Amino acid sequence: MTRYFGVLLVLFACGQIDSLEAPARTFAIDYEHNCFRKDGMQFRYISGSIHYSRIPRFYWKDRLVKMKMAGLDAIYTYVPWNFHEQKPGVYNFSGDHDIVSFLQLANEIGLLVILRAGPYICAEWDMGGLPAWLLAKKSIVLRSSDPDYLQAVDSWMGVFLPKIKPLLYQNGGPIITVQVENEFGSYYTCDYNYLRHLLKLFRYYLGNDVVLFTTDGSGLPYVKCGSIQGLYTTVDFGPGANTPYAPQPTSYDYDAPLSEAGDLTDKYFAIRDVIKKIYFQYKQIPEGPVPPTTPKFAYGEINLEKVNSVLEALDVLAPYGSIKSAYPLTFDEIKQYFGFVLYRTKLPETYSDPALLTTFINGIRDRAYVAVNGVTQGILERDKVMSINITGIEGSQLDLLVESMGRVNFGRFNNDFKGLLTNVTIKGRTLANWTMYPLDIDTAVINGLLSKTSGLNTCNFTAPTFYKGELIIPSGIPDLPQDTFIKFTGWAKVCYLFIF
Ligand SMILES: *[C@@H]1O[C@H](CO)[C@@H](O)[C@H](O)[C@H]1NC(C)=O
Ligand SMILES: *[C@@H]1O[C@H](CO)[C@@H](O)[C@H](O)[C@H]1NC(C)=O
Ligand SMILES: *[C@@H]1O[C@H](CO)[C@@H](O)[C@H](O)[C@H]1NC(C)=O
Ligand SMILES: *[C@@H]1O[C@H](CO)[C@@H](O)[C@H](O)[C@H]1NC(C)=O
Ligand SMILES: *[C@@H]1O[C@H](CO)[C@@H](O)[C@H](O)[C@H]1NC(C)=O
């Protein structure tokens, strides 16, 4: 949620100049004079949003310098918990996940940081940044005082917060404020004890000097549940929801001044001009050229040839084998948090006439490609297509390849379990004796394990299939390789494609 119409958030027009003496490197709120104070001096800032987790590390510097050159004083960035702790207790803070280096880079470039540390962030990010493995406890109440939830939060923050403590402003780093939770006032639990717990936790690891704050939708009811004493309250701008289930691309680019591809837009220059105008009495915006729009290259047409279908490649895609269960298990129960699981069983009798294959409401999360003996029958889709007709003889192999299309990132339906959540019936009869194959597509693709088979070189429009094409980087042209966009003319989602 939180759709910022443009990245700028102007906080606090300050009161009169005050000559309070203060030690160097402090950042505080002066409630009496209604302003921020940095190193004792009244201070105001203009900040813009950037998500390190959505940008390859290679481009961090380019994007931050562009933001600096626009005249911004500060950036604010979200920390997606599930980006750093993909399995319980297994952390990644290196490569594209190296938030410490990102923050140091911002510091070197001269940008202050407003850190939106979670644990929940929303951010149009899978499950709002909460790790799906929390759902291992089916009844867990996320974003509340649920002891299992708090325990997971405590372990995560116990690893994460000590890493950022040296990067707080008073310790020589760029972080001036740290946000606790996100838009909690919009969430149904309204659990003050949870916010109090977080406040204590953040204070324990970060000390008493850092300004902690909450952010909520603008409107009193939101602020009521979203804030407590001891946390500075702010609001953000803009509406919007994603239930009933409507998958959205993982993007935050709502017509951003600096596009996700690193392009400078007219809006970027307009904002720079405005900052120049309103700021001239305080400071100059940085001199020198703005780094150019990230260069792109058109590589021409790429021919795609069929490699093999998911069913053909099953042994490679499911290297750890399968799980058996009388009735379907969810993705979360078999610890597969993203992607696909193949659910397989047998037809219990012969259906020569079309027989209705049915799931119950909300049973398919989120989409299932149905095949009998490898022959595609149709697609079931969450809340939309709950039944299709199929035919086949007794003992035929029935496959439901179920896809997760991303977890709800906002609101009370955050507990978004994936897979088959209910039984599946055929002509009213409950299907049993399922074999489930969790697919590890990334590993198969990275290791080049998918090989060409002699299948039809056409798209079947329902059988998910891998295609392969080669992009040639021409020689003799300087500065290649460069970024590009890929356009799939005539392709649609039903014709599945992975790029490797
Ligand atoms: C962490 O993520 C990077 C990509 O940013 C990856 O290259 C690396 O293998 C990951 N490390 C671990 C321990 O998973
Ligand atoms: C299934 O087939 C029956 C009989 O042909 C038909 O009446 C019904 O509308 C079909 N249902 C669906 C969901 O296609
Ligand atoms: C599936 O059906 C079986 C047998 O009727 C029942 O015991 C089980 O609870 C059902 N599972 C779900 C998720 O409804
Ligand atoms: C499941 O498999 C067992 C053993 O193969 C069999 O006895 C049972 O009838 C099957 N159940 C269903 C509902 O097909
Ligand atoms: C494509 O789907 C049709 C049914 O829609 C089926 O008859 C055909 O065998 C499928 N071809 C392949 C290669 O899966």
Image (cartoon, rainbow, N blue to C red):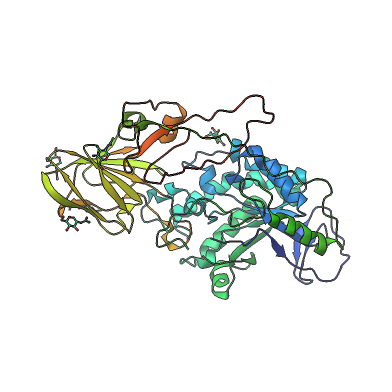
Residue 195, image x, y percentages = 55, 62
Residue 453, image x, y percentages = 33, 26
Give above or below for 265 relative to 478: below
Q: Residue most toward the bottom?
A: 220
Of residues 174 and 498, the one drawn nearer to the viewer in this rendering:
498
Q: Quadrant of ligand 5?
A: top left
Q: Residue at x 83, y 46 (%)?
A: 288
Does residue 114 appear in the picture of this structure?
no
Q: Tag count in the figure?
A: 0
Residue 46, image x, y percentages = 74, 59
Relative to 302, 66 lies left or right: right
Instruction: Examine the image and state in which quarter residue 242 appears.
Output: bottom left
Residue 175, image x, y percentages = 71, 51
Relative to 380, 165 lies left or right: right
Of residues 175 and 9, the one drawn nearer to the viewer in this rendering:
9
Does residue 143 appear in the picture of this structure?
yes
Of residues 475 and 15, the one drawn nearer to the viewer in this rendering:
475
Q: Residue at x 69, y 57 (%)?
A: 267
Q: Residue at x 62, y 36 (%)?
A: 297
Give above or below for 287 relative to 445: below
Relative to 47, 83 lies left or right: left
